[in-house]
Structures are given as structure tokens and as C-alpha cells.
Amino acid sequence: MDADFLIIGGGIAGISAAARMSELGQVIVLEAEEALAHHASGRSAALFEPRYGAPAVVGLSMASEAYFRSVPGVLSPRGLLLVGKAEGVEAFEHDLEAMAFDRISVEEARGIVPILNLDTVTMAGYAAHAEDVDTDLLVQGFAREAKGRGARILTKAKVTAIAKDGAGWRVDSTAGSFTARMVVNAAGAWVDQVAALAGVQPLGFTPYRRSMARIPAPGGHDVSKWPMMFGPGEDWYAKPDAGALIVSPAEEELMEPHDAWADDMVLAEGLARYEEMVTEPVTRLLASWAGLRTFAPDRVLVIGPDAREPSFFWLAGQGGYGFQTSAAASRLAADLIGGRPPELEAGLVAQLSPARFG
């Protein structure tokens, strides 16, 4: 065998898994693109908000926090500002409670973000616990850790065929053919296609597009200390980024797996929702892009061996939570593969297992 573990996918899921699994044996990572973290991982909002998502997602995010704090520079202060208008009270109150915001006055909110339009904004909440994530630092740190233990990380290595080979697997790719004892499926939007290549039953993952635009700093303001802002029900968000603002309609548009790009009409609708809440109009875009957020049918990550083919391991369905869950998700994957008692509590492990799909 060329490796003990062959990981398909070089996003944050695959690279963090490579770091953890390199403690257990020889690892090969195959990434189809020219660089790591090209698709969803390279198009992240880069925010650590551990109270965001389904309960199992929140559990993974909370369990990841200690690791992030142990690596200098991974987390930095940002904050989160929820702003609502008169007709959205129910959605505002839901988000305020679910994400543990402090209710603040609209005047206080404008003190934080001076472009808020108080003719429109009637409610506000603030959460200091949301932080920026240095996504590149995380990816490169995990990659260095994996390589330091002898892992091979190959780019431009699109997988073309997967077949059982004696006691393991043979995986053909554009970078060559490899054999391994176990295949780890961390292929993002392509996880079901990878499963089908291996003769494993797909689990029904669904990729959804999310578009984003970068706009100049509104009114020439210094936005570097502004929090991320969003509307109730997350129907738009805006976040400081390198002296500008990223604005997203936060849409979920069903897509086939592909190298996604922004939809101009959807982007315009999201920018209009943002503009309604502020006093400075959007006059031009600096750039626009999109990513695919891929969910399991129950919108919870899938981490564990396939129920029918235990040498095929799922690490999938990150759904936009990949970075903030990466430390605990990769540790759980290594615990399960290494036969160690998981650090996570048993109920959470069961909620994440592929066995839940029968």
C-alpha cells in the first residue's frame, strides 16, 4: 500500500484531517485544483460564531474553540451586529435569543456602525463573541503539520476512478494511481460523486450557492473595527475585509457541483437589502464571487465510516461551518479511525455518524 489513509479533497476538512491522521499512519491527500482550499474553503466569510447552526454543529464549533485559541493569530476580535426593521420582529427575536445577542438601542448600534439608517433600522443586537478566523493560517498550519509527519499533499490530482484492491483501495487520479487501506471522502460539493465512483451509496448531499461582492469602504469610513452585520433570518450580511466590505445576499440556490460564480441578479437583490439599512449607497463593486455550501439532508456534518463499507470514511457536509468546526471534526475523525475513545460526548458522535441515514 502507498498509504494508510488516502484523503480526497484539499479544503479545510481534508487538510485538517491529514494533520490528525498523520499521527496514525501514512497519509496522501489528493486535491483536484492547483491550490488547496480553492472552492468553499477559499470563499469563506471567515467568522467564528460558535452559536451558529444546528445543535450538533454548535457542539463541534464549541469543541473547536480551545484549539483555535492555542494557535496565535487564528482568532481576532470582530463582533456581530444584528439589525432589523419594524416588520421583522419575530425573526429578529429568534436570532437574538438563538445566537446569544445583547439587545442594544439603535443609537448604540449607530455608534458602532455610523452608516446605519435609523429611518429603517428599528432593532439591534450585538454579540462580542464572534471573531475573525485567519483561514489561510489554519489551512497552512494543518498542511505543515501533516507534511511534518510525512504526509504527501498533491494538487492538480483530480480523482478519476476508485476501486477495491485487495485489503484496501486503488485510486486513479490525474497525478497518478495510489493504493491505501482507507479512503477518506472530504471532497466538499463532490462527496456524493466520489462515493459513487467508489461504488458506495451516496447519502444525498446538496450543494447551495452563496454569492458575495466586495465594495469600497462606505463613505470613506475606516471599517476595520466594524463588526459583521446581518439581517434577521440571515437574508444579507456585510463584513469588513481588507479595508473594504464584503456584502452577501446569503442566498441558498440549489446547484450541481461546479466552480461557482456569483449570480448578478441575486447579488443585486442582496445589495438592495443591505442598502435599505444604511445611509451610503453602493456605487460600484470591486469584485464578486460565489461558493458552494454543501449540506447533508439534515444539515448536520457527516463524520464516520460508511455503514456498509467501513474502509470508506465520510468527512462531509460542512455546509458553511467547515472552518469553525475543523479542529473538533478532524480530531473526531482521527479518534474514530484510530480506535480511540472520542473526546466528544457519545450523543454528539452519534448525531454526526453516517449510520443515522440507515
Image (tube, rainbow, N blue to C red):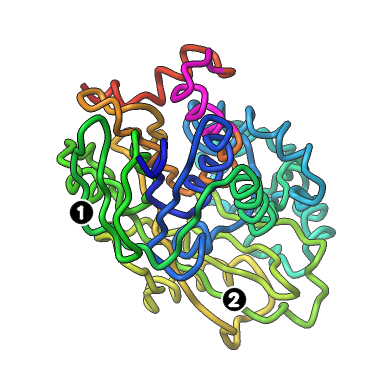
Q: Within the magenta stretch, is there residue 338?
A: yes
Q: Is residue 289 left or right of residue 178?
A: right
Nearer to us in this view, 232 or 242: 242
Work out whether 50 lies above or below 56: below
The CA distance from mark 2 to mark 1 is 38 Å
Work out whether 139 lies above or below 94: below
Q: Position of residue 147 (x, y in %)?
A: 60, 50
Q: Within the magenta stretch, is there residue 243?
A: no
Q: Is residue 242 left or right of residue 108?
A: left
Q: Amino acid at mark 1?
A: Ala
Q: Position of residue 101 (x, y in %)?
A: 69, 38
Q: Quadrant of the N terminus?
A: top left
Q: Amino acid at mark 2?
A: Arg
Q: Quadrant of the C terminus?
A: top left
Q: Position of residue 333 (x, y in %)?
A: 48, 30
**Magenta stretch: helix, strand or loop mostly:** helix
Q: Position of residue 302 (x, y in %)?
A: 38, 33
Residue span colored magenta:
328-342
User: What residue is drawn where x is 83% and y is 73%?
Assistant: 222
Q: Earlier in the sequence, mark 2 or mark 1?
A: 1
Q: Which residue is mark 1?
A: 161
User: What residue is drawn where x is 46% and y is 70%?
Assistant: 34
Nearer to us in this view, 107 or 142: 142
Q: Which residue is mark 2?
A: 214
